[in-house]
Amino acid sequence: MSGRLRVVVSGMLAGVPAQGGAAWAVLQYVLGLRRLGHDVTFVEPVAGVRPASARYLAALARRFGLEGRAGLLDTSTGATVGLDRASLRRAADGADLLLNLSGVLADEALLGRIGLRAFVDLDPGFTQLWCAAEGLDLGLDRHDRFVTIGTRIGSPGCPVPTCGRTWVTTLQPVVLEHWPVAGRARDGALSTVGHWRSYGSIEHDGVHYGQRAHTLRRFLALPDRSGARVTLALGIHPDERADLDALAGHGWGLVDPATVAGTPEAYARFVRGSWAELNLAKSGYAASACGWFSDRSICYLASGRPVIALDTGFAPAVPAGDGVLAVTGIDDAVAAVEDLRSRYAAHRAAARALAEDLFASDRVLQRLLACL
């Protein structure tokens, strides 16, 4: 696709407020497309619009210049917030493209008005297994194109089923003007933002596709062995008592993600204040060898913060070595911390260079549009 396009983007932005990182994952697409000169409207379907969600969306719209271009659609009543229904219909009428992040928009009255509908998979491996192994209807049939951030989906050696679709693979975008290189790290800690558990694990063909909990348990001794301070903005239920005690006993610092990363601005401050990211992803991403690379990690890279990342098969799409250090176990992680200590300035420069060369929104989104 080329020329100036009318694009509708749908995703999870404000329906569950106080998740600044999740908001950025969607905003990178919206703001990145606008940077390229496209006419972009955002809509998020929610099952009942809560006042907190309406306030959160309004604040985001003011902050990023999206007034009159972003709305919530109540799936139970058809009511809208931020955009009236007529404006939403006009935005969809004759739109060239829908980027449906995780396929959240299912309103046929809107979908039918849009020329080309692309399902954008943000949970590679899990998405395909939910469809092929568990028989869940993810609405793939409502779409014309299929995009995944799993850069190895459909490649030899990747066991993930393709669900009979051809998947366009893409890296995730970062709008660099919103992510300048940060100065000196404020607290000198490895950090990340995420959930202990996001959803249920999957067993398929004798392979367990698990959650971040299953990964982190293998790395519990990392603070002890590396001497590094680690701060996790971790969404974890207080009933996970044994794991909370184990994390505390091994020196892991836990902070409330809603407090330190509840808005896009707070999230950015948390990232920039860190020494580096420790991204110990869901074990399912590694088990599937799907090539997932985190939307959080690209924000760290853009800020000049190196990333230690669980190896999900993301190379060669994201080369490991300088700026990004891939690990499979705790010995690798201890060595990676030492490497950062010994060559931190070089890793910082390489991190930003990777963001500019691989993840810059202009580059990523132009390539994606050309493939649709």
Image (tube, rainbow, N blue to C red):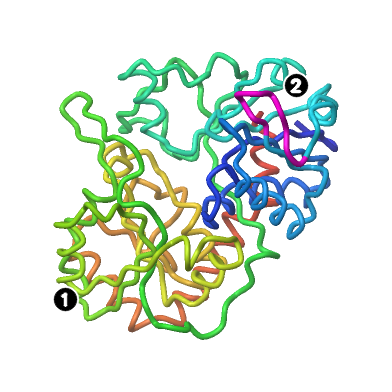
Query: What is the chief secondary structure element of the magenta stretch?
Result: loop
The residue sitting at 67% across, 64% down in the picture is 178
Depth check: give the residue in front, 232 or 368.
232
| Three-letter code, disc 1 | Asp
Name the quadrant of the N terminus: top right
Left or right: where 18 falls relative to 368: left
Can residue 185 be seen here?
Answer: yes
Residue pointed to by mark 1: 224
Asked if residue 80 lies in the magenta stretch, the reply is yes
Residue 161 drawn above or below residue 155? above
The relative height of residue 155 versus residue 319 in the rendered view (above or below) is above
Residue 185's disc is: none
Does 285 sit left or right of 359 as displayed? left
Residue at 75% across, 21% down:
114
Residue 284 sits in which quadrant? Answer: top left
Q: Is disc 2 surrounded by few (<14), some (14 to 19) or many (20+) residues within 10 Å?
A: many
Is 121 one of the magenta-colored residues?
no
Question: Residue 315's spot in the image, x, y percent?
Answer: 40, 50
Mark 1 or mark 2, which is nearer the start of the sequence? 2
Q: What is the CA distance from the residue labelled 2 to the residue labelled 1?
A: 54 Å
Quadrant containing the C terminus in the rendered view:
top right
Secondary structure of residue under mark 1: helix
Reply above or below: 243 against 41.
below
Report x, y in % for residue 233: 39, 64
